[in-house]
Image (spheres, rainbow, N blue to C red):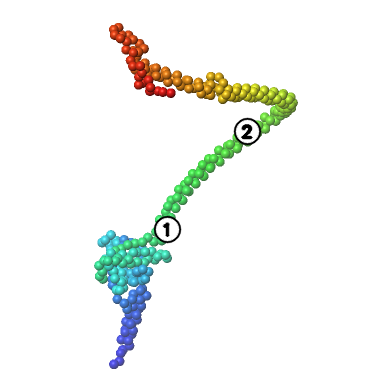
């Protein structure tokens, strides 16, 4: 059977188009030799996410983005179709985190929940997003920019104040120059009077020096006299103190030897015993008087005087 040239050209065209289609999809990341499950996830904004971007689980690529579709009926949200390998078991609660890579691209990171029911092909995963480096840098740079603006405003205020201060300083320097000129003119006009005043001051200083020389001997004599008076008063005070100490010593010696009334009281045992006996007798008398006052005072009109017992138990309360 002979095939015509037209059939051969058509067949070669079909093979070429097929190879072009499959080659293009293969370069986009499509794998025709492994089966994958399709899942869906909805984002508010996908950033720079494009079809064929990788889907990673713990840093290992397990799938890729199939397509992105704008949902106009749901507030312009973006529906992302995912192709994930069949051997990756996804459960309810699993998340797909949209992350930004260092060079500006986007990728999806799987976070598989544990303990949930296994998802089926066509189910929707939970969407989540992570702030990229650009967003973090913007957040960190925003306070710095605000502070820089405030600093610039404050610097402008300070510069304006310096301008005013410079104007005031210029006026002050002008006034100072004028004042210095006036002082110079005044000094020039009164130079002779100032010279005469300085001569008088020098003469007065010389006179004061001579007067000081005259005062030095007088001050020396005055100091000697003051020292003599101090020494004299101190000698008198010491003499009086010695006399008082000597008198006290004599009194103590007399007491120790039993001289005088106080000495006898301290040293004479007989006198001490007699005084004790007298005190005991007076005590007995007062006790007897308190118990039997009629023995000493009798005011009875009739009857016999009651002298009471000759002795009373109270009389013997104190004995020597």
Where's residue 142, x and y in %? 42, 54
Q: Nearer the viewer, residue 67 or 82?
A: 82
- Name the residue located 27 percent from the left edge and 67 percent from the top edge: 91
Which label sits on residue 137?
Answer: 1
Question: How would you rate the neighbour count of disc 1 (Cα within 10 Å): few for under 14, some for 14-19, many for 20 or more?
Answer: few
Q: Nearer the viewer, residue 265 or 122?
A: 265
Left or right: residue 176 versus residue 122 is right
- Name the residue located 52 percent from the left edge and 22 percent from the top edge: 268
Is 22 located above or below residue 75 in the figure? below
Which label sits on residue 276?
Answer: none
Could you tell me if residue 125 is visible in this image?
A: no
Q: Nearer the viewer, residue 261 or 139?
A: 261
Q: Secondary structure at mark 1?
A: helix
Where's residue 231, x and y in %? 67, 25
Left or right: residue 211 versus residue 103 is right
Is 161 located above or below residue 38 in the figure? above
Which label sits on residue 179?
Answer: 2
Where's residue 78, x and y in %? 30, 63
Where, quadrant-wise, is the C terminus in this rendering? top left
Is 74 located above or below residue 217 in the figure? below
User: Which quadrant of the view contains residue 173?
Assistant: top right
Is 89 located above or below residue 163 in the figure? below
Q: Secondary structure at mark 2?
A: helix
């Amino acid at each position: 059977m002979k095939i015509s040239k037209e059939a051969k050209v058509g067949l070669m065209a079909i093979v070429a188009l097929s190879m072009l289609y499959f080659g293009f999809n293969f370069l986009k990341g499509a794998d025709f030799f492994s089966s994958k499950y399709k899942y869906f996830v909805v984002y508010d904004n996908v950033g720079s996410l494009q079809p064929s971007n990788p889907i990673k689980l713990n840093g290992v690529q397990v799938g890729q983005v199939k397509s992105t579709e704008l949902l106009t009926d749901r507030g312009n949200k973006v529906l992302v179709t995912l192709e994930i390998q069949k051997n990756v078991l996804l459960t309810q609660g699993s998340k797909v985190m949209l992350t930004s890579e260092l060079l500006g691209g986007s990728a999806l990171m799987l976070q598989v929940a544990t303990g949930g029911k296994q998802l089926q092909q066509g189910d929707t995963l939970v969407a989540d997003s992570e702030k990229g480096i650009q967003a973090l840098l913007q957040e960190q740079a925003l306070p710095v920019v605000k502070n820089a603006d405030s600093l610039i405003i404050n610097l402008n205020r300070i510069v304006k104040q310096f301008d005013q201060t410079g104007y005031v300083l210029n006026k002050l320097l002008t006034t100072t120059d004028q004042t210095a000129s006036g002082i110079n003119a005044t000094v020039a006009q009164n130079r002779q009077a100032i010279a005469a005043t300085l001569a008088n001051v020098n003469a007065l200083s010389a006179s004061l020096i001579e007067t000081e020389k005259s005062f030095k001997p007088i001050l020396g004599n005055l100091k000697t006299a003051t020292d003599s008076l101090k020494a004299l008063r101190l000698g008198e005070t010491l003499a009086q103190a010695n006399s008082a100490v000597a008198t006290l010593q004599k009194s103590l010696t007399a007491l120790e030897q039993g001289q005088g009334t106080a000495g006898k009281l301290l040293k004479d045992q007989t006198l001490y015993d007699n005084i004790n006996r007298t005190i005991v007798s007076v005590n007995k008398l007062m006790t007897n008087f308190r118990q039997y006052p009629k023995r000493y005072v009798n005011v009875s009109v009739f009857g016999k005087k009651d002298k009471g017992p000759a002795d009373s138990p109270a009389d013997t309360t104190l004995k020597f």
